[in-house]
Image (tube, rainbow, N blue to C red):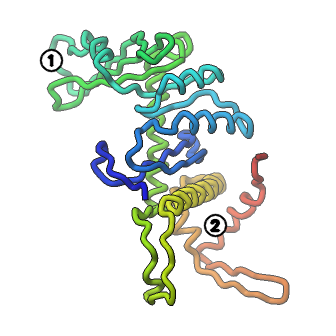
Amino acid sequence: MKAEWNGHYAARIYHPLITSIAETGDMLDARLRPGNVGTADGALDVILDVVDRARKSFCEVAMVRIDAGFPSATLLAGLEARGIDYVPRLPANRVLDRLAEPCMKRPPGRRPAEPRMWLYELRYQAETWDKPRRVILVVKEREGDLLLDRFFLVTSLPWTTKLRHEVLAHYRERGKAEGHMGELKDVLAPALSSTNRAKTHWRGKKPKSQTPAVDAFACNEVRLLISCLGYQVMHIARRAMASATGTGWSLRRLRERVLRAGARLTISGRRMTLALSAAAAPFWSVLWPRLMTLHWADP
């Protein structure tokens, strides 16, 4: 089944690994993993494979933004060998905490009404790294908190290319990717089953013969990939509608106003005619010509 207990999330889950372009919302890859694997399990092959396929098929990859838990020494070295910059969040440890300790003090004086933030440059080399790398310490003051909070970013960008506040701003663009994942779960709601038991009823009736148990993990992987493919198709349509109407479109609005449309299909001889409802027809009249101009990228 591979839906396993995960102590970090305190639940029995699957642990999918999804890559996307945060700025545009386009989906690049999705892999389903057992629920008890580590965050970085399989990330090396996935990220480098996505980067190589993207560079070969449709664009040059300038930078990779990675969540905490992923930046292994091999992955960082692989990106550097390809000439691709990166900005991942770095999990804290005792060495980083020791480097950050002198910076974890508030300046003297009364706290202002607005929370503050400080950025510091560090040089850090993990035991598995072959060289020291640039680390940016982000110290945050939260309203009502007695102690300061902090997190670390590691990057291959030199300070002459991007200053520390620019690196932080770029990393925070990952929030857009989380928003797109939220839309996928809200509108498409991929339902992953945690059981591989045999089917005993079909449409309320008991089948004449007992069906064998299915591979639940394989079925769930297909569900995940179909959901991601459905998201990408809807995302393309959403962007086409936004371009045509000059207004923003969410996936939910696209589903309710454009896709959930009453229609009548008439078959006559060798011709099929689809008559859409009056409410949806104006949307499809501007959407369909734009969809017909698109073509698949070369494999």
The answer to which image quadrant residue 67 occupies is top left
Residue at horizontal 58%, vertical 68%?
258
Q: Are marks 2 and 1 in contact (CB under 8 Å)?
A: no
**Residue 273 occupies which quadrant of the picture?**
bottom right
x 65%, y 73%: residue: 281
Is 159 on the left or on the right of 234, as rendered?
left
Residue 285, image x and y in percent?
70, 67
User: Which of the pair 214/95 is nearer the observer?
Assistant: 214
- Give the residue number, with chain letter if any, for mark 2: 283
List x then y, in percent, for residue 173: 48, 35
Give left or right: position of 230 versus 131.
Answer: right
Q: Is residue 245 left or right of residue 268?
A: left
Q: Which residue is mark 1?
A: 110
- Nearest the eye: 284 or 79: 79
Q: Is residue 205 above or below residue 124?
A: below
Q: Is residue 35 above or below residue 158?
A: below
Asked whether residue 245 appears in the rendered view, the answer is no
Name the spot of residue 27 as percent of width and height, x first. 58, 47
Give the residue type that dot 1 points to: Arg
* Circle 2: element type: helix
Give the amino acid type for the residue marked by disc 2 in the picture: Phe
Front residue of 146/240: it is 146
Where does residue 87 sit, x and y in percent of width and height? Answer: 49, 25
Write the residue at 60% across / 20% down.
Answer: 80
Q: Residue furthest right?
A: 270
Q: The N terminus lies in which quarter of the figure?
A: bottom left
Q: Residues within 10 Å of mark 2 (few under 14, many from 20)?
A: some
| Residue closer to the observer: 100 or 177 | 100
